[in-house]
Image (spheres, rainbow, N blue to C red):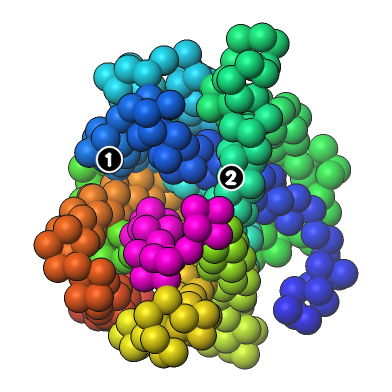
Amino acid sequence: MADVKTVTEKIGKYRWTFAALLLFSTTINYMDRNVIGFLKDYMCSPEGFGWSSQDFSYLTSIFTLFYAGFTLVAGWIIDKVGTKIGLAASLILWSVAGILSAFMGKSLVAHCVARSLFGAGEAGNFPSSIKAVAEWFPKKERALATGIFNSGSNIGAMICAIFVPWCLLTWGDGNEAFGVFHGWQMAFIITGLLGFIWLIFWGKIYKSPKQKLAEGVITQAEFDYINSDADDKAAAESGDDQGSVSWGKMLTYKQTWSFAVGKFLTDGIWWFLLFWLPTYVKQQFCGDMSADDTAYTVMITNFIVFGVAIVGSVYGGSIPLTLMNKGWETYKARMTSLLMIAVLPLLLLLTQTAAGVGGVGSMTGLVLAITIISLAGAAHQAWSANLFSTVSDMFPKKAVGTVTGIGTAMGGLGGVLVQLLAGYCDGKLGTQLGYTVMFSVCAFAYLLAWGGMKLLVPKFQKITDL
C-alpha cells in the first residue's frame, strides 16, 4: 500500500474518486437487492403476505434468472453507449423497479414482475463498474480498485440487516408513513430513492480521463499513469479504446471462457453464503434459543461474516499490485494471487467439525464455525476482485463490458445450480450431512475454477484483433 501512496503523491489521486463513486453505487445496488432477503420472514408470515417458503423461492429465482440473462445484453449495450450512460440507465431501471415493488401489494405474480425488471436493471452494475475501472486505472491497480468498489456488496448487506427491521418496527400497523405506507413499503421506497441521489453525483463528475485532462482536472502525469500499460497507451492515442464489439465474436476466444468458467464455478458460493447463512446459523446453533436471541445471533453473525469480507475484498485486490511492483508481469501476478486465495476456502472442510466443539449449540462451536466461514467469505471477495480484473488484462477496454456480462451471466447460472443443490441437501440430508456436503463443494470450487482457467489460458495472450 506504501507504493500506492508514493505514486499518488507524485502524480495525483483523482482516479480514486471513481472508485469511491462505484463503491457507493454497489452499496446501493446490494441494499436494493437484499431488501427482499430481510423481508422474507414478514412476507412468509400470516400477518404479512402469507406466502410459503416455496413462493418466496419463486421470487428469488425469477430475479436470478433475469439478472443472469440480461447481463449478456447489458455488457454489450454498455460497451456501445459508454460507461456513464450505461451505469446511469442501469441504476434508473433497478431503482424504479425497486420502488414499484412497494406498490405490488401481496400478489406474488406482481412482485415477480417488479423483480424481473429489477434484475434486468441490476445486470448493468458490474459490467459498467469493471469498464469504469479499466478506463481509469492501470492494470496493476485494477484489482485493488475493484476490491474497493466490490466491498459495497458487503456494506449494503450489513446496512440492510439493520435498516429493514427498523422500517418494519417504525412503520407498523397504525403508524404508517404519511398515513399510507407500511414498513415493508418504505424499505423499498427509501432504498430506491437513494439511487437517484447518487445519480446526481455520477452525472456531474464522471467523464473519461481524456475529457478530465482537457478540463485540467487531472494532470498529464496522472493521465499518462492511467494509460501506462503499452497496449492501453496505444489504444488511447489512436482512439481505438472506444466503441463496441460483436457479442458472438467474444465467445470464440478462450480468454472469454476462462473468465466465464471462473465465474460459473465460484459465484454460486457467495450466493450460498448470502442466502443460506441465516438458515444455517438458526438450524445449527439456535435450536434452544428464544426468537429474540435467535434474531440477534443471526444479525451478529451476518455482520461479522460480511464485515470480514470487506477486508478480504480490499486486501485481496492489493496482492497483485504488490507483486507487480516487485517486477512480476501482469498475468503471472494475477494468477498467482488467485491461486493463493483459492487455497483458503479449503478451511470450510473443517466447518462442521468446528461447529460441534463443545456440544450442540455451544458458543465455542458457533465462534469457530463463523470464523472459518468469515475467512472463506473474505477469500471469495478477494478472488472476485482479481477475477474481474482478468477481463481488462486480456481484452481491450471497448470489449470489457461485453465479456464481463457473459461471465456474470455464467456466474448467475452457477448460482442457480448451487441454490438448487443447497435446497436438496437441506431438505433431504439434514443439517449435519447437508451442510457438510455444501461446505465441501464450496471448499474445492476455487481450486477447480483456477485449474479450468489455467487450462484454457496457460499463458498470457492479449486480444488485439478487435
Q: Amino acid at mark 1?
A: Ser
Residue 196 magenta: no
Residue 256 seen in the figure: no
Which disc is residue 170 wearing?
none
Residue 372: image location, x then y, percent? 46, 81
* Marks 1/2: CA–CA distance: 20 Å
The kind of secondary structure element at disc 1 is helix
Q: Is residue 81 above or below residue 19?
A: above
| Residue 297 figure quarter | bottom right
| Residue 418 figure quarter | bottom left
Q: Residue at x 66, y 9 (%)?
A: 179
Residue 181: image location, x then y, percent? 59, 15
Q: Is residue 42 above or below residue 314?
A: above
Residue 459: image location, x then y, percent? 31, 80
Residue 5 seen in the figure: yes
Outermost residue to the top: 179
Which disc is residue 53 wearing?
1
Q: Is residue 182 left or right of residue 388?
A: right
Q: Is residue 270 above or below residue 41?
A: below
Q: Residue at x 37, y 58 (%)?
A: 279
Q: Which residues are magenta?
A: 271-294
Q: Residues within 10 Å of mark 1 (few under 14, many from 20)?
A: few
Q: Residue at x 38, y 53 (%)?
A: 275
Which residue is more in the foreground, 192 or 220?
A: 192
Q: Amino acid at mark 2?
A: Cys
Which of discs 1 and 2 lies nearer the camera? The answer is: 1
Which residue is more in the foreground, 171 or 162?
A: 171
Q: Residue at x 41, y 90 (%)?
A: 357
Residue 185: image location, x then y, percent? 54, 22
Q: Which residue is identified by label 2?
A: 160
Quarter of the picture containing the N terminus is bottom right
Q: Earlier in the sequence, mark 1 or mark 2?
A: 1
